[in-house]
Each structure stands twice: as C-alpha cells, then as structure tokens.
Image (spheres, rainbow, N blue to C red):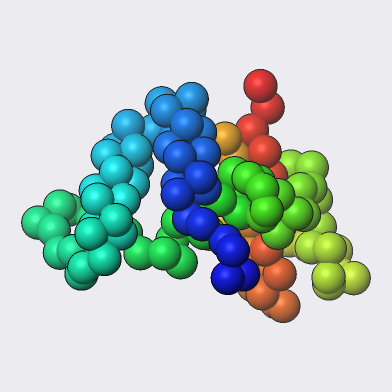
C-alpha cells in the first residue's frame, strides 16, 4: 500500500460523519487530522482518547468507504453469524461492538466474526 494516501479517506469519513450528524466524531477526526498532518504525537485533554490511524481505518470499514467497502459483510437485522452454523441466541451469542447513526457492528461471541447491520432509512 505504498501509494495509499490517508488524506482522501479522512475527507470521505468526515463527509460521512457530517451526513449522519456525528458532530463529536467529526471534531475528533479533525483533531486527529491536524496531528497526522504534522507528523507528531498528539495528546489531548478531550474526554475521549486521541484518534490513531487504526481507528480511522476502522471507521472507513464501518462506513464501507473504498477501498474498505467489503471489509464487513452486511447482514439483515437479527441474522445468524455467517461463520457459525448453529442457531444464534441474540441475547448471549452476539454483542454490539460499535453502534453509530448508520447501524451496528455485530460480533459473534463464539467465533469472533463481525458484520454490519445497517439502520433502516
């Protein structure tokens, strides 16, 4: 990925945050971007930890932005784990790893597989 630039991806994530009204996330991403561009460690007194590259990439995966649009399968709400063959008990077998305005990242507690369940529009 030597030709990969984080700049367009950060702009695309910012646009998605803005579209979904995720103002606190947008502010944190902008703070991250300032630190990223300066190539220095950035520490903050914000109530949330400072952003890092892995978190920016994870949000790109969650929002299905290129080149990460297929990082997570998208399943219907309440679907069973795509890896485990057993019927899932929604109260004990899965958990919500991330909840955001556009949906959820669901993770199987049995095998660790994760997928997206998108909010209905």
Residue farthest to the right?
85
| Residue depicted at 79% across the width and 63% down the height | 81
Residue at the top extreme, as displayed: 121
Q: Nearer the viewer, residue 69 or 120?
A: 69
Q: Position of residue 110 (x, y in %)?
A: 70, 77
Q: Is residue 37 left or right of residue 118?
A: left
Q: Relative to residue 100, is residue 95 drawn left or right?
A: right
Residue 31 in view in this figure: yes
> Viewed as shown, does residue 100 lie left or right of 83?
left
Q: Residue furthest front?
A: 3
Residue placed furthest toward the bottom:
111
| Quarter occupied by the N terminus | bottom right
Residue drawn 41% across the image and 64% down it = 53
Q: Position of residue 118 (x, y in %)?
A: 67, 38
Residue 5, image x, y percentages: 51, 57
Q: For this rendering, which residue is in front, 46 or 108?
A: 46
Q: Nearer the viewer, residue 68 or 2?
A: 2
Residue 106 location (% of width, % of height): 63, 56
Q: Which residue is pictured at 30% across the width and 59% down the height?
A: 36
Nearer to me, 105 or 2: 2
Image vertical order of residue 93 relative to residue 32, above or below: below
At a point 57% along the width and 61% down the height, the residue shown is 4
Q: How many marks?
A: 0
Q: Is residue 89 above or below residue 84?
A: above
In the rendered view of the protein, which quadrant contains the C terminus?
top right
Whether residue 101 appears in this view of the structure is no
């Amino acid at each position: 990925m030597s030709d990969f630039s984080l700049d367009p991806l950060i702009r695309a994530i910012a646009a998605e945050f803005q579209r979904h009204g995720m103002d606190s996330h947008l502010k944190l991403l902008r703070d991250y971007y300032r630190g990223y561009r300066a190539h220095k460690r950035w520490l903050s007194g914000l109530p949330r930890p400072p952003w890092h590259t892995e978190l920016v990439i994870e949000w790109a995966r969650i929002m299905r932005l290129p080149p990460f649009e297929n990082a997570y399968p998208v399943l219907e709400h309440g679907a069973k784990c795509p890896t485990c063959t057993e019927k899932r008990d929604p109260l004990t077998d899965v958990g919500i790893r991330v909840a955001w305005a556009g949906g959820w990242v669901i993770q199987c507690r049995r095998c660790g597989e994760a997928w997206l369940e998108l909010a209905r529009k």
